[in-house]
Image (cartoon, rainbow, N blue to C red):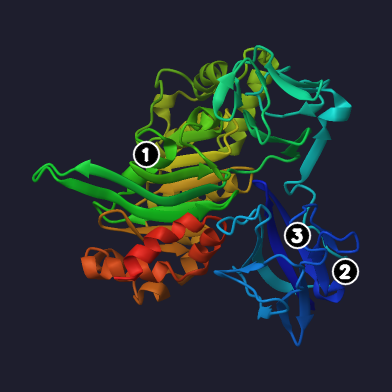
């Protein structure tokens, strides 16, 4: 078996996963038509950089294309070579601003694979970037209906949701009386001209408009979440002075991942959760969805964010099916037929493994089953981000594991899952763990399998005691700033380094 490198390409807030077998290396990236991966940008060299495989290792080589190539935390010298490993980030700033990287290539995985095929999309259902040239098409109809130019599967999308027309060099967006609204740059609109660089949100989908062309992903995926120097400050009850309960948190939640947030009492878990959901906005820093700052744009994402509180809010005198049908009438587009409503309910029931319980009264369900009904209610809206607050609280060990397995399954079905928990028994089922120290300090963000080694403990429970000590908290805060996860974030969001520079320079 030979080697294969998997890259996540991010361009204009759009992502695609590609892979390259060693047998097809070297692979060139640049503006020139003979490159293996063509970058259709002016501020990119005809041959910008090359990925090579030699002596059992992958390498990056800058091709001196006249524009700088970013590698992790620095720019490469012309012709410089660097070894590649998982987590490395290659970036290109195509706008002339050295503070931004408009195109990034992140090494997601280096793995054994058969030497077949060339540079290609990894799977058919990966997000594929599509374009519609409005200058030629003139009118684009977006909605759930089969006659739409862009057909969206979500029941939150109206049959004919909105349209975009192009005339006399101008594009105009028009909402067609949709139930859940059409948003332009975060503001709900009925009719509006599209400015250059406009972002259009409809439930489950984001469109970008540039140069008369509409860009979007063919396949829905979960939302990516970026927290940049996030801070929440309250007034101390005893002293009246400002008190940070979320203290400079920077991290990125990948789309379609399952991330668990843990920490001891007073660590700021609930406060961080409310910042992400928008129920209690942060007082500093940024919360971004798919790279878009939600400040002033929160309404545009409300339709695709689901929240399951710790305490279930259910009508106990209804059956499971009746309860979900009531919720469906409120959440699904008003032009949905009864058949579509029932199909959505059946799909949500199947998603949470409650088949056979449709006619059971809510009052007669177990605690774990009630929690699944609460999750099913949110799934009716086809969320791209599902946030859960202590869903395993009060559950037996077997039900706790079952809930964790459910969350993992949901994260593989076009939904990013972010969960707060205090139970560490089944955290091996998540993709990433975010561990907070007292005072809302992020001390670890990474895979569960490296957690104990990172903190130097034999038992995971010992971490909680460590993260009550202010000196230990600061130590691990600075240690996190050296990890690949943080470097990946900084490569695309340089502002995230502010907290690291402030803390680690002391």
Label 1 element class: helix
Label 3: how many residues lie within 10 Å, few (<14), some (14-19) or many (20+)?
A: many
Label 1: how many residues lie within 10 Å, few (<14), some (14-19) or many (20+)?
A: some
In this rendering, the count of numbered labels is 3
Return the mark for residue 44. Answer: 3
- The correct choice, above or below, for 73 with respect to 261 in the image is below
Q: Is residue 394 visible?
A: no
Instruction: Please name the residue that numbered disc 1 is placed on.
Output: 274
Residue 64 in the image, given as x and y percentages of width and height: 75, 73
Viewport quadrant of the C terminus? bottom left
Q: Spot the residue most to the bottom.
A: 55
Viewport quadrant of the N terminus? bottom right
In percent of the image, x 72 and y 20: which residue is there? 172
Instruction: Please name the residue that numbered disc 2 is placed on.
Output: 116
Label 2 element class: loop
Image check: 414 left or right of 260? right
Indicate which label's residue lies in the foreground, 1 or 2.
1
**Separation of marks 3 and 2 at Cα, in angstroms:** 29 Å
**Separation of marks 1 and 2 at Cα, in angstroms:** 47 Å
**Which is nearer the N-term, disc 1 or disc 3?**
3
Indicate which label's residue lies in the foreground, 3 or 2.
3
In percent of the image, x 55 and y 57: which residue is there? 99
Residue 370 in the image, given as x and y percentages of width and height: 43, 33
Label 2: how many residues lie within 10 Å, few (<14), some (14-19) or many (20+)?
A: few
């Amino acid at each position: 078996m030979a080697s294969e490198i998997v890259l996540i390409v991010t361009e204009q807030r759009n992502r695609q996963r590609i892979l390259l077998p060693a047998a097809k290396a070297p692979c060139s990236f640049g503006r020139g038509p003979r490159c293996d991966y063509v970058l259709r940008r002016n501020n990119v060299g005809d041959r910008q950089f090359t990925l090579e495989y030699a002596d059992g290792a992958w390498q990056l080589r800058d091709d001196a294309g006249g524009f700088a190539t970013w590698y992790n935390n620095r720019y490469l010298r012309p012709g410089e070579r660097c070894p590649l490993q998982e987590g490395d980030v290659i970036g290109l700033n195509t706008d002339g601003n050295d503070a931004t990287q408009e195109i990034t290539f992140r090494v997601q995985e280096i793995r054994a694979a058969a030497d077949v095929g060339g540079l290609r999309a990894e799977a058919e259902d990966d997000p594929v970037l599509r374009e519609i040239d409005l200058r030629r098409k003139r009118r684009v109809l977006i909605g759930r209906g089969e006659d739409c130019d862009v057909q969206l599967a979500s029941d939150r999308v109206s049959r004919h949701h909105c349209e975009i027309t192009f005339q006399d060099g101008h594009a105009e967006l028009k909402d067609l009386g949709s139930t859940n609204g059409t948003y332009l740059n975060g503001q709900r609109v009925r009719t509006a001209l599209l400015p250059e660089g406009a972002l259009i949100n409809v439930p489950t989908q984001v469109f970008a408009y540039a140069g008369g062309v509409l860009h979007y992903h063919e396949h829905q995926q979960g939302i990516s979440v970026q927290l940049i120097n996030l801070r929440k400050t309250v007034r101390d009850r005893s002293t009246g002075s400002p008190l940070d309960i979320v203290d400079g948190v920077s991290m990125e939640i990948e789309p379609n991942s399952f991330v668990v947030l843990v920490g001891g009492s007073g660590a700021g878990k609930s406060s961080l959760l409310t910042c992400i959901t928008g129920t209690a906005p942060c007082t500093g820093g940024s919360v971004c969805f798919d790279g878009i700052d939600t400040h002033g744009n929160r309404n545009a994402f409300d339709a695709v964010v689901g929240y399951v509180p710790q305490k279930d809010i259910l009508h106990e005198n209804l059956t499971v099916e009746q309860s979900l049908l009531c919720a469906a009438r409120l959440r699904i587009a008003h032009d949905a037929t009864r058949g579509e409503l029932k199909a959505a309910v059946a799909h949500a029931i199947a998603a949470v493994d409650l088949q056979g319980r449709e006619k059971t009264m809510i009052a007669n369900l177990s605690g774990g089953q009630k929690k699944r009904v609460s999750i099913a209610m949110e799934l009716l809206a086809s969320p791209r981000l599902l946030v859960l607050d202590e869903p395993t609280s009060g559950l037996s060990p077997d039900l706790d594991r079952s809930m964790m397995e459910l969350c993992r399954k949901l994260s593989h079905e076009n939904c990013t899952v972010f969960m707060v928990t205090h139970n560490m028994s089944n955290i091996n089922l998540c993709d990433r763990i975010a561990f907070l120290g007292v005072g809302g300090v992020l001390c670890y963000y990474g895979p569960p399998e490296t957690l104990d080694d990172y903190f130097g403990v034999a038992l995971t429970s010992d971490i909680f005691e460590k993260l009550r000590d202010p000196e230990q908290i600061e130590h691990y805060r600075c240690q996190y700033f050296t990890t690949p996860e943080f470097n990946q974030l900084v490569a695309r969001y340089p502002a995230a380094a502010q907290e690291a520079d402030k803390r680690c320079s002391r």
